Image (cartoon, grey):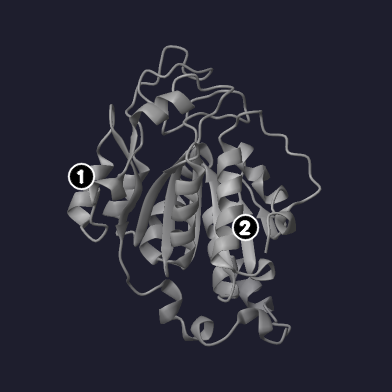
Amino acid sequence: MSLNDLKTPKTNTWCPGCGNFGILMAFKKALIETGIEREDTVMVSGIGCHGKIVNYVKINGFHGIHGRVLPTAQGIKLANPKLTVIGFAGDSDQYNEGWGHFAHAVRTNVDMTLIVHDNMVLGLTTGQATPTSQQGFKSKSTPFGVIPPMLNPIAHALVSDATFVARGFSGDMFHLKSLIVEAIKHRGFAFIDVFQPCVSFNYLNTYAWFSKRVYKLENENHDVTDHKKALEKSLEWGDKIPIGIFYKKERPIYSDSLSHVKDENLTKLPKQSIDITSAMKEMT
């Protein structure tokens, strides 16, 4: 597989300089490196600027509704476990409307990957605050500044017993690519939060702002099996912000306990009509 094999005829409409470009290229390069077949791979995206990513990669894609990336992706994976499923969500898409799904996706440990494009602002609707906007951040929805503290998705994933937790920066495409490769290879729910600068509506968290602060956990000899240390690192914010793999472990995936999913591909089962009349009468 080559980059040309993944090219689509769609015109890219992201703003010039958008952090989504780094995620897109990192993902394409990760697909090539892992060697997985295009026909065995599915992308699922939600609502927001990130959602267009399914138009720019020539593999199976499902563009869902706001906040519902995870249940859609989980359903696809459980129906056909042979597929490699990667969900893409925005910070508002996942951490607002989709927040209720997040903790349960982590807990149930369905074998899939979630990549969150975290630009700390609503870009598609031209500049409102999101759960990851910093305190004091002024936007169209918060003209006097954001009041509550920013959400910490890394810490939340860790305390929910996630099996793979990482953070990337779209300004470091090659490092991000390596994280995506590891996430796809991981057996279980793999979560990557990606700092993705919005050049049009977030003038605080810029490429320069992140570049000045981020450091790689692997350069600090971080032990990815140390849950306590991972949680400590997840709370770092300010002059130094860690990126890389915070934590990784193995535990049974959800389908291991479902014999009808574990042993059979549900898409291969014969289609048959089922009379639901009695059930409908009971519900009415």
Whether 262 is drawn above or below 5: the answer is below
Residue lying at the far top of the rendered structure? 144
Q: To which quarter of the image does residue 272 belong?
A: bottom right
Residue on which disc 2 sits: 43
Pick the front one: 191 or 139? 191
Q: Position of residue 85 (x, y in %)?
A: 56, 63
The residue shown at (60%, 69%) is 36
Graded by Cα atoms within 10 Å as few (under 14), some (14 to 19) or many (20 or more), the crowding at tag 1 reads few
Amino acid at dot 2:
Met
The residue shown at (59%, 29%) is 123
Q: Secondary structure at mark 1?
A: helix
Whether 44 is drawn above or below 251: the answer is above
- Figure quadrant of the C terminus: bottom right
The residue shown at (63%, 47%) is 65
Residue lying at the far left of the rendered structure? 228
Whether 224 is drawn above or below 35: the answer is above
Residue on which disc 1 sits: 232
Amino acid at dot 1:
Glu
Q: Position of residue 273 (x, y in %)?
A: 73, 83
Q: To which quarter of the image does residue 276 belong?
A: bottom right
Q: Relative to 227, is 181 on the left or the right? A: right
- Figure quadrant of the N terminus: bottom right
Pick the front one: 268 or 280? 268
Q: To which quarter of the image does residue 134 belong?
A: top left
The residue shown at (63%, 62%) is 42
Q: Secondary structure at mark 2?
A: strand
Q: Relative to 247, is 1 on the left or the right? A: right
